[in-house]
Image (cartoon, rainbow, N blue to C red):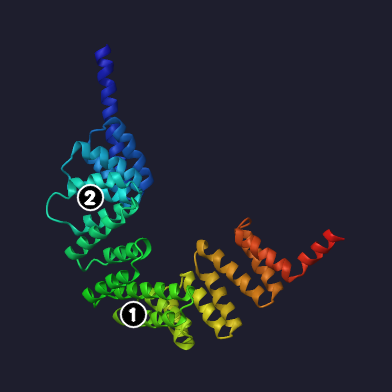
Amino acid sequence: GVLLAGGLHRLQADRSADLFLEKARDDAENGDAEDANRSYQSYLRLRPTDSDARSELAKLSYDNGSYENALGQLEYYLRLVPGDRESRRMAARSALLIGRYSDCREHLNRLMTGEPDAELLDWLGQCQVGELKYDQSVESYAQSIELAPDRLEPYQRLAKVLYNHLDQKDDAEIVIEQMVARNPESSPAMLAYSQFLQSRAIQFTSSGDTELAREKYEAAKDAAKASVTLDSTNADALLLLASCELFLNQIDDARDHAKEAQRLRPQASSIYRLLAGIESTAGNSDQALEWLTLGIENVSDGDREELVAGRASYLLDLGRAGEALSAIEQLRSVQPDSAALRFLQARLEMANGQWLREFDSLVN
């Protein structure tokens, strides 16, 4: 009787496991990652050494950006199948993305035993930056670049380390120039060059060196224009080009390029802020407000509040407190306790003289 009961229990468990696995695979195929994850977990509690199912769950988690869960599943899987290099790459990248740099390096050490690999060297450089080993990261990024000069990210990461952490700003610029020289037909490379030049221009502006700032803004404008020439649909390049032209007081060109960026990417809040800034600089306050209003209508909820707050602030700048009150109430309905709301409310009270009346009542 005991043997029969045990056999029935195992049979029932086997049937349950098969059902969980079937459901997990069906859910994954139908794009229901949450239910698929639950079913895989239930199945693996019954059959923890099924390497195929564990690999499937790991890949599902990885593809859906659940890197911590992916790493846990991959590390279990790699104890079962230690020679699966593709899964170990996923484990290394998952560890990198969640900031577990020592775990990442452990996987990289096992991967970097054959021919040099540009991507793995790039990941190693990122680990070293995360561990504040900046000099070592410079060497790793440089090796990655030499192996694959068409990969843009290592140039940018190397330049960032030189610029932000090693105070080698001129060397950082040389690295970005090398990226462009080696990738002359790449619109993203020209955009990255323009972004770097603009960051230098901002630095010179902050330090009061207006001549050098203008020189860098001109260079950033030229690089952004080259990026647009290579790819006329590059909205980021158009936006950067317009922002440089605005700084250089080239209002008509800035307006045209910002409008083209808005046509290509009508849900980007940054474009509406730039268009409002262009019209405000040109003295067209009503048109600036129209752009902010259009942006509020077009952008997603997460970005809308920023435009609502910007519109309210601009109305207060214009002395239009009544209209600003309406915008502030609109912001209150979605962000009832935000710092921006409190700041705008204080500005409105000052504009209405309420702060002075309250001060007088305290004094008297």
Horizontal and vertical percent position of residue 160: 34, 64
- Identity, as a three-letter code, of the amino acid under mark 1: Ala
Question: Closer to the camera, 42 or 350?
Answer: 350
Left or right of 220? Residue 286 is: right
Q: Could you say which quadrant of the image residue 359 lies in?
A: bottom right
Horizontal and vertical percent position of residue 316: 66, 73
Reading the image, the residue beneath label 2 is 89
Q: Which mark is residue 223?
A: 1
Quick one: label 1, few (<14), some, or many (20+) residues within 10 Å?
many
Left or right of 25? Residue 109 is: left
Q: Is residue 74 above or below residue 361?
A: above
Question: Closer to the camera, 321 or 300?
Answer: 321
Horizontal and vertical percent position of residue 354: 77, 66
Q: Residue at x 41, y 72 (%)?
A: 199
Disc 2/disc 1 C-alpha distance (Å) = 35 Å
Helix, strand or loop status at disc 2: helix
Q: Earlier in the sequence, mark 2 or mark 1?
A: 2
Quick one: label 2, few (<14), some, or many (20+) residues within 10 Å?
some
